[in-house]
Image (cartoon, rainbow, N blue to C red):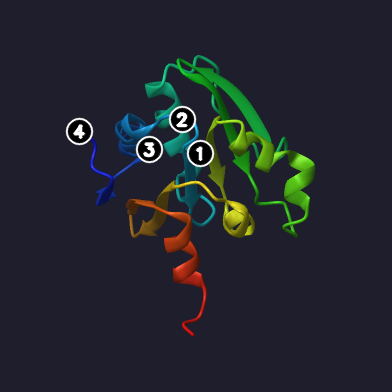
């Protein structure tokens, strides 16, 4: 059984792909995976391992310029977003993020910060960060309310 919360130090791209493949064990239609990290932290590399473990046959690349790549996996569609180039939350409507999520597609979102207020589904948050020559990755399943409670100031 895949742990829904954890932390790991990774030593390279192969380790990052392997963790993506491991956490793909949590995948189900409608799950949103939030990939948070600086440039070069391994978000797309993680996505490659995640998608490969689900049987995606297409090459998984960063959707930075396309904004969304759509893949087939054994349980339906997988939508892979990269919101890095977006400047305002209102741009999310134009790229169809809400429709993707509400359709029940498995959704990966790199640079998800603009979308957090609009996501009503439980999500797997994956934080990747540089740690010297390694990468530190922390992950957890989180509800929309828990995400809001972390970002809203206490009353």
Residue 13 - label: 3
Of callouts 3 and 2, the N-terminal one: 3
Q: Nearer the viewer, mark 3 or mark 2?
A: 2
**Side of 35 relative to 130 (left or right):** right
Residue 44 - label: 1
Q: Are marks 2 and 1 in contact (CB under 8 Å)?
A: yes
Q: Nearer the viewer, mark 2 or mark 4?
A: 4
Distance of label 1 from label 3 (alpha carbons): 10 Å
- Image height check: is 60 above or below 102? above
x then y, percent, for residue 23: 33, 36
Q: Nearer the viewer, mark 1 or mark 4?
A: 4
SS category of the residue bearing label 2: helix
Residue for badge 4:
1
What crowding class fits label 2: few (fewer than 14 Cα within 10 Å), some (14-19), or many (20 or more)?
many
Q: Nearer the viewer, mark 3 or mark 4?
A: 4
What crowding class fits label 3: few (fewer than 14 Cα within 10 Å), some (14-19), or many (20 or more)?
some
Distance of label 3 from label 2 (alpha carbons): 10 Å
Of callouts 2 and 4, the N-terminal one: 4
Q: Are marks 1 and 3 in contact (CB under 8 Å)?
A: no
Distance of label 3 from label 4 (alpha carbons): 23 Å
């Amino acid at each position: 059984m895949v742990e829904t919360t954890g932390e790991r130090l990774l030593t390279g791209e192969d380790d990052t792909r392997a963790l993506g493949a491991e956490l793909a064990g949590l995948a189900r239609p409608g799950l949103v995976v939030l990939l948070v990290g600086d440039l070069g932290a391994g978000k797309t590399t993680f996505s490659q391992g995640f998608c490969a473990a689900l049987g995606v046959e297409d090459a998984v690349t960063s959707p930075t310029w396309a904004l969304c790549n759509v893949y087939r996996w054994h349980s339906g569609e997988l939508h892979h977003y990269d919101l890095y180039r977006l400047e305002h939350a209102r741009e999310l409507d134009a790229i169809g993020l809400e429709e993707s999520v509400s359709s029940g597609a498995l959704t990966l979102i790199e640079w998800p910060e603009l979308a957090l207020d609009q996501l009503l589904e439980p999500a797997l948050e994956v934080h990747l960060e540089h740690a010297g020559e390694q990468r530190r990755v922390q992950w957890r399943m989180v509800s929309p309310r828990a995400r809001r409670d972390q970002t809203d100031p206490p009353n």
